[in-house]
Image (cartoon, rainbow, N blue to C red):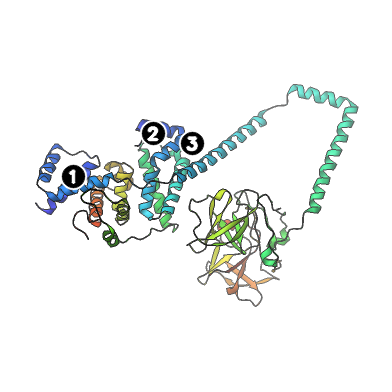
Amino acid sequence: MSENECLQIQELISAAADGERLSAEEIAHAKQHCASCASCTRFVAVLASIRKVSPPAVDESVILATIAEITREQQAAEAVAAAEATAEVSSKSKPLPGLIQRLEVLLSNPKLVLIGAAASILVVAGFGTIVGVRYLMTPATTSMSPEMTGEAPVPMSADVVIQTPPASAPQRAGTHEAAPAAGTRFAVLGEIVYEVAESPVLRRPGGDSIGTITTDLGSGSTGAFAAYATREAGTIMILGPGDAVFEAALVTRTLEGRTYALTSGTLGLFGMWPVMPARFAPPAEEDGSPTFEQVGRDDRGTPIFAPAGASPEAGFAMAPDTSGVESLAGSPNWTWWVPFE
Amino acid sequence: MPPARTEETELIEAARSGDVAAFETLMRTHASAVYAHALRFFGDKASAEDVVQEVFIKVYRSLAGFNGESAFSTWLFRVTRNICLDSLRAGKRRPIPVDPLTIATDASPDHASGVIDKVVLEEAMRALSPEDREALSAVTLFGMEYAEAAEALGVPAGTVKSRVFRARRTLMTIMGLLGERR
């Protein structure tokens, strides 16, 4: 019996096992061959044994996590659809005739008009007082992080919301302007900025704990979350609420082949732009003066800046909206980049 | 056992109109095929689980575009294959290398009982060439006919037949089941 003939027969048997239709001739030939060939008989037996082995099954937790994610997505879509439907109805609706008549009665009675006006003044005054008190009690926000000042970090509870100060054009190096609608997803660990992935991953953090990140992870409520190292350089994992795990990656540029990472003071909320370290006064001019001077270009040809006389190897600044990093597009702030080992 | 084609079509229709429970039924039917394919591709449980999640979220979002011309499992195979290849190309995940010689040394098939060691078989699967493994995966995990697998893989049906057969022969050889240990 030639080896070639055995291989042809075994290929037929393999195809038959997969439900492929064989001709009557092929079946008869294979049967006849196997009756006198130990090798092909063995192939049939082993093939049957292999086919009995069930493939690895996925953990139930993976199915549940995926369905939970899809349910959240579905509910969000339904909420948006409902809101859009409501808005459409509202825009089409007209004041009810009865309501107009009641308003006419009210306006025709001078006493009721006076009472209404007084009530309005009280409401406006009360609102103004609340706003004023809140303004006075809200400490001025600076771009300085506890890490930069050397102060002990203030413990954050999950329900503390960091105030986002309004943007101020001349102070571009230190503003925390809200991002455009798409929203930024930056978080800071030890002055280094990480961009947090949109969806949680199923993997559990396997590396060492490397600190705590103060962020809202997009929820609007800032909390302190544990960060873990991963096997991939420049990537960390953040253990968020409900044990959701988010991957986060460095934001980088290169200078002479060396990687530089974006830095910032604390960014407690998604939607905040990275800011320059507080030790640098915001440059007044586009050429970086008086704080910086242009010291060259990075590997993509973007101008980089450093304090007068300083080498960019130790760190460099980039002008607003020039980093070439997609997620930083539109940022009004100067940025500071440091070597990443 | 996968649901009948008409039953599956009804589930897809229901899922398309926002019925998450129907989608869960579909997922439970096919999740292990996706998982096994990804596990054999990357050799890493965590990566395979991530792929399962990515695949089914993508499938859910793309249900509107599924026209039903091919079987759901064929479409699912395509999505799974693309996600595995894309994450490999993007450097997001890397397959853990496997040494066929180590597997052959470890394998101790029980010829008398005909029982195959599942762990060794899975390791041997990982030692197959990517082309042979994905052909075998399309046919045995996703239940595709040779013609369907041929379309999904962009090769003739005869090539699928050869690759599946070669995959099986290689598995048996690696595991020393044919008395021809490498």
Query: Which numbered disc covers residue A84?
Result: none
> Which residue lies under the disc numbered 3?
B20
User: Distance between the Cα atoms at labels 1 and 2?
Assistant: 31 Å
User: Distance between the Cα atoms at labels 3 and 1?
Assistant: 42 Å
Q: Is residue A125 visible?
A: yes
- Residue in front for this viewpoint, A285 or A129: A129
Q: Kindly indicate whether the residue at mark 3 contacts the one at mark 2 (C-beta within 8 angstroms).
A: no
Q: Are marks 1 and 2 on the same chain?
A: no
First in sequence: mark 2 vs mark 3: 2
- Residue in front for this viewpoint, B182 or B81: B182
Amino acid tagged 2: Glu
Seen from this angle, which residue lies furthest bottom?
A309
Q: Residue at x 49, y 54 (%)?
A: A204
Q: Residue at x 14, y 41 (%)?
A: A26
Query: Which numbered disc covers residue B8?
Result: 2
Amino acid tagged 1: Leu
Q: In the figure, B142 relative to A187: above or below? A: above
> Which residue lies under the disc numbered 1?
A12
Q: Residue at x 39, y 49 (%)?
A: B82
- Residue in front for this viewpoint, A302 or A74: A74
- Residue in front for this viewpoint, A259 or A225: A225
Q: Residues within 10 Å of mark 1 (few under 14, many from 20)?
A: many
Q: Quadrant of residue A251?
A: bottom right
